[in-house]
Image (spheres, grey):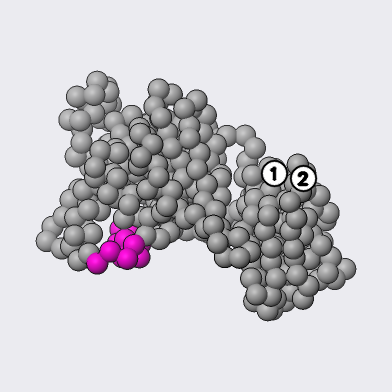
Amino acid sequence: MGELEVDSHSEDIVDLGHLNVYLADNEITEIMVISKDETYIEKKGRLELTNTRFQSDSEIIDLCKRIVVPLGRRVDESSPYVDARLPDGSRVHIIIPPLALKGPTITIRKFSKEKLQPQDLINFGSAYPQMLEFLEWCVMIKKNIVISGGTGSGKTTLLNIISGYISENERIVTVEDSAELQLQQPHWVRLESRPPDIKNKGEVTIRDLVKCCLRMRPDRIVVGECRSGEALDMLQAMNTGHDGSLTTVHSNSPRDCVRRLETLCLMSGMDLPARAIREQLSGAVDLIVQQARLSDGSRKIINITEITGMEGEIITLQDLFVFKRSGIGSDGKVIGKFSSTGIVPSFMAELKAKGIRVDHSIFMPQ
């Protein structure tokens, strides 16, 4: 396998050949080349095998070069994968033999060029109005929110929308692995991590940047995703006056999200007892918003869950809003409805103290 080397030149536009037609289709969210004879797309939440064919592995390698050359990156047998970003913001992952056994593999995650609005989630059936009204209140009074979900569940899209509730008068610092957030507020400081160079030097991690942003007088800290020891730094920031922070975590339920955050904190290298981590977590995070991609490809908020404290060694949770699934229709669509659980959040007095007029009916079961 030949080496992909880079130079110092940059390009404003990347010609992706066979893949250009998929990049231009706004209904396609993912493009996946897994061999010269197999290219898949995700369209409207469904995977489809296309009729796109490459002549050889070398043609795919040439395509990979066009992607990595402007970025000062390389991929070869000794460093056989790379994460990159196209000029339009799409995220690209490349992995080649010997790790990719079928041949060079390219995965492109596309992002909408237009920022989605809360009403779009309602129109898509991803949420219902009372859920979003409640989340707006929570952002206004600076509750710390973790968006939880699996791969491709729409966590970043939801983070973008919830971030839109932040006041334009606040200073926002965002930290990301790959810049995907599309905030509209004027006072926005944008930080992006940096991988090591070809000599394995110069790496700047998410954790490094979280520590940096604490010294930048942020009103809000937004971390695109917690996936390692930076989770502990985030919790400590939330517990020391940086209220209203937002982040995402890979997990499949609110309870799983709590366990995942505990595990990530242990990856910080600090020798903390489990109870100390749980106390930090229960004192820092106010809400977990669970996002899911369902069997029909639709993406929905399936839980809004409050962390209420601890009982003994256990962090206590209570669902405020849920999506109740009742079956599958003849068209393969998931049947269900959004509903309040009847539980009123513990911080209602805080909402009133901040002058927010609360319609209690949104907490009545549907």
Observer-side mark, 2 or 1, equals 2
Is 118 situated above or below 62? above
**Which part of the image, by quadrant, shows the N terminus?**
bottom right
| Labelled pair 2, 1 in contact (Cβ < 8 Å) | yes
Q: Where is residue 9 in the image (x, y as percent from the top left)?
A: 76, 48
Counting labels gives 2
Residue drawn 43% across and 48% down?
A: 209
Residue 229 location, quadrant? bottom left
- Read off the residue under disc 2: 11
Between 20 and 225, which is closer to the camera in this rendering?
225
The residue at the point 55 percent across, 36 percent down is: 182
**Magenta segment:** 258-271
Does residue 239 appear left or right of residue 182 in this picture? left
Q: Is mark 2 on a helix, strand or loop?
A: loop
Q: Identify residue for label 1.
A: 87
Say whether residue 334 is visible: no
Which residue is painted at 21% across and 48% down in the image? 283
Residue 204: percent from left, percent from top: 49, 54
